[in-house]
Amino acid sequence: LLSAVFTADLHLKLSGNPEHYRSFRGFLEKINGKFRRLYILGDLFAYWYEHPGVDLCSANPGLRALKDFSGSGNEVYFIYGNRDFTAGESFRRYSGVSFIGPELDITSGGRKIHLCHGDSLAKRDIRYRIWKALIRSRISLFVFSRLPVGAAVSLADTFKQVGKNRKYAAEAVNVMAAAEARKIIISRNIDALISGHTHLRHEESFQHRGRKRQVFILPEFSFPGDFLTLDKGKLSYERLG
């Protein structure tokens, strides 16, 4: 078994394309028994919200696929993104994931690796930072939880559209994120940083204090496709599917 495989930005729709869910389940079936761990670096869903009047979990095919996968002895670690940051205990219970959080540090082959969704890396993306501050404020979450179900769904869908980056903007954000990733690697003296968010694949290596450092920004999920893997400290892309 290899140590781990990483993916991000699947954007599964809560009510939508069943083919996308079949693709996700096909991916899980392909990696089952081949990797010890799966790290999902955010935006598993196009948007995810917790509302007392809505049960998103019990019948969701994405969570059910993860539950089957984790039930086969696999470990799943979920780093939430800008679209599913409200994932909580119900999400954990129905998916079987081992971890939910905004970031995670792991060690492999003596190398320290930092995992995050990547939206926090785009510090100069003012438009996005304003949007993020708005939807994550306590006032917004309080109001949202008390809206009628229909209004809550409509508002969540509006937030989803506002949070989208146009293609040219995504390329600029990718450059910002890579630059910030390099700063984090140097300031924290870690060996690699892996993120998603921009949907654009980026990888680079540089030397610092006599050690090889690496930045990986994952592309949007596509199966069959190339996926970043980890084995004994070595990070590399492998074709799956």
Image (tube, rainbow, N blue to C red):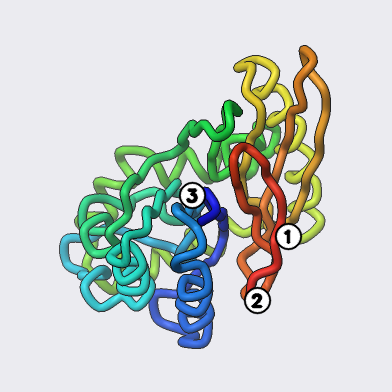
Disc 3 target residue: 81
Camera-side residue: 112 or 85?
A: 112
118 relative to 146, above or below: above
Viewer-proximal residue, 33 or 39?
Answer: 33
Q: Amino acid at mark 2?
A: Pro
Q: Nearer the viewer, mark 1 or mark 3?
A: 3
Residue at 67% from the left image edge and 24% from the top image edge: 185
Q: Mark 3 falls on what kind of element?
A: loop
Taking the image as shown, residue 67 lies to the left or right of residue 1, namely left
Q: Residue at x 62, y 41 (%)?
A: 194
Q: List x then y, in percent, for residue 22.
A: 48, 83
| Quadrant of res 190 | top right
Q: Nearer the viewer, residue 192 or 158?
A: 192
Label 2 packing within 10 angstroms: few (<14), some (14-19), many (20+): some
Mark-to-mark CA distance, 1 and 3: 18 Å
Where residue 18 sits: x, y (%)? 46, 87
At numbered mark 1, what does the secondary structure look like: helix, strand or loop?
A: loop
Image location of residue 150, percent across then percent down:
28, 74
- Quadrant housing the C terminus: bottom right
Label 3 or label 2, whichever comes before in sequence order? 3
Kind of residue sitting beneath label 1: Arg
Local crowd at mark 3 within 10 Å, few (<14), some, or many (≥20)?
A: many
Of the residues tagged 3 and 2, which is closer to the observer? 2
Report the disc number at residue 166: 1
Marks 1 and 2, how far apart at CA? 25 Å
Secondary structure under tag 2 reads loop
Q: Could you say which quadrant of the image residue 227 lies in?
A: bottom right
Residue at figure coordinates x 43%, y 39% from the top left: 102
Report the residue marked by disc 2. 224
| 179 is higher (above) or lower (below) than 86 | above
* Crowdedness near tag 1: few (<14), some (14–19) or many (≥20) residues, C-alpha within 10 Å: few
